[in-house]
Image (cartoon, grey):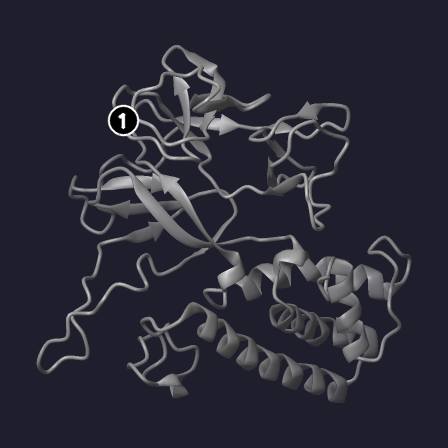
Amino acid sequence: MAVYTTPVDVANRALQLIGVPRIVAFTDSSKAAKESAFAVDKIRQSDLRRSVWTFATRRAVLRPTISTTSQVTFAAWAIGTTYAAGDIVLDSSGYVWLSVQGSNTGNTPGAGGASPFWVSYFGPLTAQVWVTATQYFPGDVVYVSGTLTVVYICVLAHTSHTPPNATYWHVIQGATSALAVQLSPLGVNPPNGATTRNIYPLPANYVRMAPQDPKAAANVRAGTLAGMVFNDWEIENGFLFTADVSPIIFRFIADETDVTLMNSLFCEVWAAHVAMEICEPLTQSVEKRGAAKAAYEESLQMAKQMNAIEGGSTEEEISETPQGGGQQGQPAQRGQ
């Protein structure tokens, strides 16, 4: 059983660190409940962006925006609706969820647990028109030409099975699409305007990019640290700009909200960070905030070390401080 199971557990750990009585729910009338409810999700997203956490690493199929690309609208979750595995809905805050069990009725997205009916959705938010002989992968989202109101998600890799086909495609209940209003110019290289690049919309609940092939061997060359091949990717305004061609199996850190999927050291980082931020309005104690900050820094260092062990050997991340092995904002040297 997970030590942490809900965001309230994290908030209570934060309150414990600063000596404030614990809460039952974020809807409690206490100031502690109000302050922690305001901070807890914002700080979770911030801490997820701090590192390539193994529990939050995901992959999604990205395809470039073209003239027939459509923007998908998922239906809001309804308590009386029965959902099938593969259906995608929005909750009241606009967060996107994927049904992973059939006969899914009355189960609130985000409840989590050992056998959840819903998991966070990290796939495309746009649909491509289905094209014969194209290699499709699980997670691809398409529509058939002339039928924008029916959206399909691929459930089995294939090359030539036209939707509807229950073996290879699932109709996403309630989802519709409309041709995308494209604000970024298609095929434009942002720095100089040259028409040499494709643009790929980033997936749902994206937080940060992860190394795309972290185990690729470096070609060591004389006089250099390594001979890694660099790409031309640039992320701007929710799009990835590149000269690459479709498709990209994109590796990234996702906005994971299910606490039961998080490792306990990350939850300690999250809780200590919440404690540090809510300490002043709740205690007005400089000493307690300093203790919470020390707990945050210590737990962050330990969590990153354990995460690095799980991730294995790879290229260094950019240092967070000038003391991390080079100037701030520059990659740390190997071994630092």
| Residue 75 rendering spot, x and y as whole percentages | 61, 26
| Image quadrant in which you'd find residue 134 | top left
Q: Quadrant of the N terminus?
A: bottom right
| Residue 230 rendering spot, x and y as whole percentages | 21, 61
Left-right relation of 207 to 12: left
The structure residue drawn at horizontal position 43% and vertical position 77%, both measured from the top left corner, is 320
Please tell me how crowded label 1 is: few (under 14), some (14-19), or many (20+) other residues with Cα within 10 Å: few
**Residue denoted by label 1:** 134
| Residue 79 rendering spot, x and y as whole percentages | 76, 28
The structure residue drawn at horizontal position 61% and vertical position 79%, both measured from the top left corner, is 299
286 in relation to 190, above or below = below
The structure residue drawn at horizontal position 16% and vertical position 39%, both measured from the top left corner, is 195
The amino acid type, in three-letter code, at marker 1 is Thr
Left-right relation of 79 to 191: right
Q: Quadrant of the C terminus?
A: bottom left
| Image quadrant in which you'd find residue 69 | top left
Looking at the image, which is closer to me, 159 or 259?
Answer: 159
Residue lying furthest right? 29
| Residue 68 rendering spot, x and y as whole percentages | 33, 22
51 in relation to 194, above or below = below
Left-right relation of 185 to 228: right
**SS under mark 1:** loop
The structure residue drawn at horizontal position 8% and vertical position 81%, both measured from the top left corner, is 222
Looking at the image, which is closer to me, 60 or 286?
Answer: 60
Looking at the image, which is closer to me, 319 or 108?
Answer: 108
236 in relation to 267, above or below = above
Residue lying furthest top? 146
